[in-house]
Image (cartoon, rainbow, N blue to C red):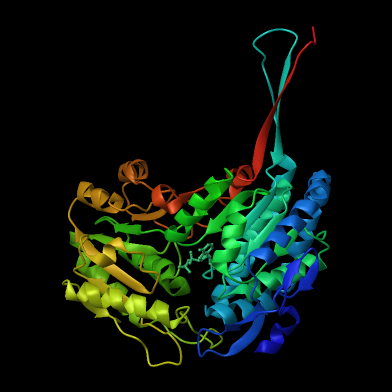
Amino acid sequence: MSSSYAHLLRGKAFLRGQWIDALDGCVFNVTDPAGGRLLGTVPDMGADDARAAVAHAHAAGPAWRALPVQVRAAHLMAWHALILKESEALAALLSAEQGKPLAEARGEVLHGAAYLHWFAEEARRIQGDVLPPPVGGKRMLVTKEPIGVVGAITPWNYPNSMVTRKCAPALAAGCTMVLKPAESTPLSALALAALAEQAGLPSGVLNVVTGDPKAIGTMLATHPLVRKLSFTGSTAVGKLLSQQAAGTVKRLSLELGGNAPFIVFDDADVERAVDGVLRAKFRNAGQACISPNRLFVQARVHDAFCARLAEKSSALQVGRACEPGVAMGPLIHEQALARVAALVDGAVAEGARVLTGGLRLPLDGPFYAPTVLVDVRQDMRISATEVFGPVAPVCRFETEQQVLTWANDTPYGLAAYVYTADMRRIFRMLDALECGMVAINDTAMSNEGAPFGGVKESGFGREGSSYGLDDYLVLKYACIGGLD
Ligand code: ADP
């Protein structure tokens, strides 16, 4: 399989348009989560390498922001076109290093590319304002400028689309960047950088450093020339980066953990709701921040819903990403599997019942069976934890008020799902749910034209849509007097 993406494999980091090693020459291995096959090695960089990358991004800034917006947009469009041309190779590489089935990887590559297209178009609409002055002889203008050098830190669950999702608005706005991909999945980010290079992106505009998360993260969060940090990952690391970034008063976008409620009312289309769980819960083996984490099902449809969900979940084909017909791959590593297994075992010890799954599968790699748990309560540990695995814990509820209280009883506030046929209830739920995104009778909420992001400890800032572009722009107000 490696031949299909060999031309996109890069074993070096990308700084100032050059493919380079770490200053100390160290490297680390990247392996296939299913079976541990070695896919490549990449530089194990640290603080000094990151500092150099920031200097390159800073040096490239003035020329990049001075380009006419159509020219910046054309660079993004050229990058987009190359990603589409290479989408099969990028998907194969993504599957190999992350483990998700090939069909899902293809979807991610196209989803990620769409951000480049969308923000290339949106760049032309970075407009200002002329405001009415309070006295005569004045003009008051508001313009929007790129914030400056952006540091971006991306996770391993969406190694391709998280990169374009951050690069597209930042570059469209006129910012230059230093990107640090996750250590489990750096190859997809480097392949994207190779295509950016081929698309003619000027050197230094996008720099990619691989290596020590703590050393590089601290450098990006504390360096005075980095004016914005965009992070997707765990709430714990997000909090640490916020503290570090405070010293230089950096702007932040934080897309952190979630604990999404998935609420099915008695009047819902049960079959549609079951299919929604299958798509949203088992996609990426449940390793997504918007994955339904707690399923609340109203009493009258509870048993029918659970039986159908267990039947369909147990029929999902689990296996290596490249096998035909596979619907779910492995977890990212053994540690992730051990964590998920402990959460399930803990829930069972607290009184939950396993309807299907609940065990590791006898395959080569960290494969866990699609699992449905019932008799789950809101006071169990599994309900308070982001599961990040293929486990659907179901909790029975009686009233709308009760489920709303439970749904909001979490420090997180990223996504929520509601299945109901009652229009008045839909709007009551939209008003009352404490989260950044709500999907009603649907699960496919993430796209380039919509603002993705959370509230509470799920973070702030939005990715996608014109709101996502604002996150990389600063306002400048000009007061011009003496005109009378
Ligand atoms: P997860 O638990 O899903 O792996 P992390 O928050 O640990 O989530 O990882 C998300 C990203 O944050 C990755 O790119 C990872 O390398 C990076 N990261 C991990 N620890 C730190 C840290 N101390 N400082 C900065 N970035 C970090």
Count of numbered circles on the image: 0
Q: Measured from the top left, where is residue 134 in percent x and y?
A: 64, 11
**Residue 426 placement, left or right of 224:** left
What residue do we see at 23% from left, 69% from top?
A: 304
Q: Measured from the top left, where is residue 225 in percent x and y?
A: 68, 49
Considering the image in quadrants, where does the C terminus appear?
top right
- Is residue 127 among what the camera can see? no
Q: Nearer the viewer, residue 312 or 223?
A: 223
Q: Quadrant of residue 475?
A: top right
Q: Nearer the viewer, residue 145 or 1?
A: 145
What residue do we see at 49% from left, 62% from top?
A: 233
User: Image height check: is 1 above or below 435?
Assistant: below
What residue do we see at 41% from left, 79% from top?
A: 335
Q: Nearer the viewer, residue 259 or 222?
A: 222
Q: Nearer the viewer, residue 83 or 367?
A: 367
**Residue 190 placement, left or right of 336:** right
Q: Measured from the top left, where is residue 467 in percent x and y?
A: 58, 43
What residue do we see at 77% from left, 49% from top?
A: 61
User: Image height check: is 324 above or below 433?
Assistant: below
Q: Measured from the top left, where is residue 27 in percent x and y?
A: 65, 80
User: Image height check: is 420 above or below 272?
Assistant: above
Considering the image in quadrants, where does the N terminus appear?
bottom right
User: Image height check: is 271 above or below 137?
Assistant: below
**Residue 33 placement, left or right of 206:** left
**Residue 93 placement, left or right of 232:** right
- Is residue 437 among what the camera can see? yes
Q: Quadrant of residue 112?
A: bottom right
